[in-house]
Image (cartoon, grey):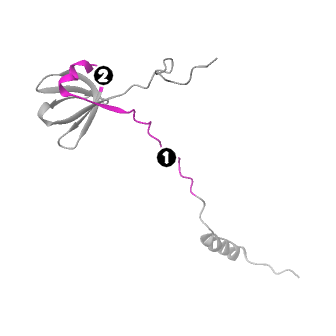
């Protein structure tokens, strides 16, 4: 003979058992990887005129770094346009160093002494 269990008790036990069940595994989204920053080359402040219209990174004596396109360089200050579109004027006496990205080598041209050429 089968024993019948009241529906209310089954529902109560089901909720009670579910409370002690392992929580569902959380899926974490993959971490966003930032693109690799290209190698940088330091540039003398007096040579910045050659880099007008090019991307520069300016490190200040106040321990801040500003990046953007160089708009103007004078003996007293330089102007850059940041990635957000803001134009900044940075006094020359507050600049610690200025760097520019180094372009990757051209794969069509090999360096002297490169052993990639076929030998007969």
Q: Is residue 99 above or below residue 120?
A: below
Residue 14 sits in quarter: bottom right
Q: Which residue is mark 2?
A: 54
Dot 1: within a 10 Å radius of its alpha carbon, few (fewer than 14), some, or many (20 or more) residues? few
At numbered mark 1, what does the secondary structure look like: helix, strand or loop? loop
Label for residue 31? 1
Quadrant containing the C terminus is: top right
Q: Residue 15: x and y, percent?
A: 63, 71
Callout 2 secondary element: loop
Name the magenta segment's main secondary structure.
loop
Q: Which one is nearer the viewer's eye here, 45 or 115? A: 115
Of the two numbered discs 1 and 2 on the same chain, state the one appearing first in sequence.
1
Q: Judge left or right: residue 5 versus residue 49.
A: right
In magenta stretch: residue 86: no
Q: Say whether residue 19 is left or right of residue 68.
A: right
Q: Residue at x 49, y 20 (%)?
A: 110
- Which residue is pictured at 14% across the width and 36% down the height? 94
Of the two numbered discs 1 and 2 in the rendering, the one whose residue sits closer to the viewer: 2
Which stretch did the figure color magenta? 26-55
């Amino acid at each position: 003979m089968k024993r019948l269990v009241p529906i209310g008790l089954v529902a109560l036990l089901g909720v009670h058992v579910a409370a002690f069940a392992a929580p569902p595994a959380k899926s974490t989204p993959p971490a966003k990887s930032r693109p690799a920053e290209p190698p940088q080359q330091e540039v003398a402040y007096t040579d910045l005129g050659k880099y007008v219209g090019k991307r520069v990174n300016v490190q200040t004596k106040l321990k801040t770094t500003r990046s953007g396109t160089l708009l103007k360089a004078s003996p007293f200050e330089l102007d850059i346009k940041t990635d957000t579109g803001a134009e900044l004027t940075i006094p020359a006496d507050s600049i610690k160093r200025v760097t520019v990205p180094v372009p990757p080598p051209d794969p069509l041209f090999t360096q002297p002494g490169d052993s990639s050429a076929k030998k007969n």
